[in-house]
Amino acid sequence: MIPKQRILDVPIYQPGKPIDEVKRELGLTEVIKLASNENPFGCSPKVKEALAAELNTLAVYPDGGSMQLREELAAFLQVDPSQLIFGNGSDEIVLMISRAYLSEGTNTVMATPTFSQYRSNAKIEGAELIEVPLKDGVHDLDAMAEAINSQTRVVWVCNPNNPSGTIVTESELLAFLDKVPRDVLVVMDEAYYEYVVAEDYPQTIPLLDKYPNLIILRTFSKIYGLAALRIGYGVAHANIVGHLNHVREPFNTSSLAQAAARTALTDQEFVRSCREQNRINLKRMTDKFDELGLDYFPTQTNFVLVNMKEDSDVVFRKLLAQGLIVRSGNALGFPGYQRITVGTAEQNDKLLTAVETVVREALKQ
Ligand SMILES: *Cc1c(COP(=O)(O)O)cnc(C)c1O
């Protein structure tokens, strides 16, 4: 078998370690996973009933156009139904964008470090990567605008950025959008949109009128707590949605995912409560980091990137031995750091005890 050479240059995604594997390997009975930015409160309890009702129709293909979810989400977002595209997670929309707009001879501009899927999909399509280093953990939008040339097709802005958790503000974004040529697609990946509390965070959907070269990606995987079902969406002008529909698989989102998303959308009280608890538990984490003298990036998400001042993989293993799975910064382009998801108050207590133990032991040596 002779594969395309360039796919072999794309690293196989290494997910956070699964809980059961860690329990078995280390002989632990209790393991807490704070590695994948999942919602520690699960999803709205109403979703389970909606899923039960779908179980009678498993033999039938889903509605490929997601018509009911499309109508309801369009009303919720106050956009036209033709402006929405659904994906098997927003990951799949990243794939569709790359497939539709990138090829050999084109390039794509993104920050580094940022969400790894932009890079992987661009490489699969054979496009050239132009990676612009973050400045103090934040997208350097001036440098990104300058990096755009006549071969550029897509620019990625992860806002808030994964793995740093930082945002670009409304005024920074508007200045940037005014500089981007109208035939270059700007992708705003807003996977953590619902967690943001900063007042200068840009509301991007109203910008679609003025900037028709924009697509906004959001997901039901994070605050809505439906990561297992794989459903996310894009909001853009209908002509961009049209391009993406050319490369979309006919039945790319399942009927279970569509039903769960529709119900989850109706429970905004759950979303609000998760956002509030996240800020409370996050504050407790950063207060403890301050006390221990650990630097971290200001975050608008449900995770925090913290500098533990020791090799990331070493700290990762020390925390793992105490039953805590976090994400080593070595894999994320931030050596010395750990990316830690904000858990429940109880998980937080255990995490902070373990972090304190690791830091104090390191000081003794
Ligand atoms: C989690 C995440 C996504 C993808 O989530 P899906 O589960 O595929 O919807 C996209 N972008 C960023 C920045 C993420 O952190």
Image: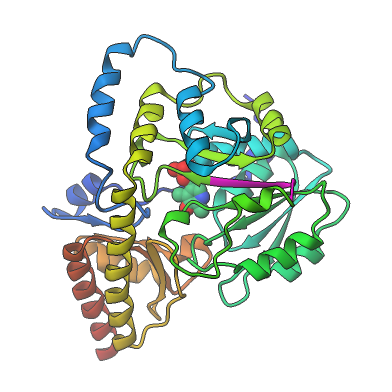
Q: Residue furthest right?
A: 150
Q: Residue at image x 86%, y 56%?
A: 149
Q: Which residue is depicted at the point 28% across and 89% down?
A: 363
Colouring rule applied to residues: rainbow
In front of the other: 290 or 272: 272
Quadrant the N terminus occupies:
top right
Q: Which residue corresponds to the image point at 26% horizontal and 46% vertical from the top-left?
A: 42
Q: Let me know if residue 279 appears in the view.
A: yes
The image shows a total of numbered marks equal to 0
Q: What residue is rendered at 30% in x and 58% in y?
A: 34
Residue at the far top: name it.
59
335 on left or right of 33: right
Q: Is residue 213 magenta?
A: yes
Task: Give x and y (percent) for residue 172.
Answer: 67, 70
Residue 108 vertical placement versus 163 (above, below): above
Q: Quadrant of residue 142?
A: bottom right
Q: Position of residue 137 (x, y in %)?
A: 56, 72
Task: Tell me the quarter of the image containing the C terminus.
Answer: bottom left
Q: Is residue 226 left or right of residue 187?
A: left
At which x and y percent is residue 186?
Answer: 70, 51
Q: Image check: 308 left or right of 8?
A: left
Task: Looking at this view, name the residue that lies furthest to the left.
Answer: 29
Q: Tell me which segment is drawn in magenta.
A: 211-217
- Residue 5 seen: no
| In the foreground, 285 or 113 | 285
Q: Position of residue 315 (x, y in %)?
A: 33, 71
**Viewer-proximal residue among 269 and 61:** 269
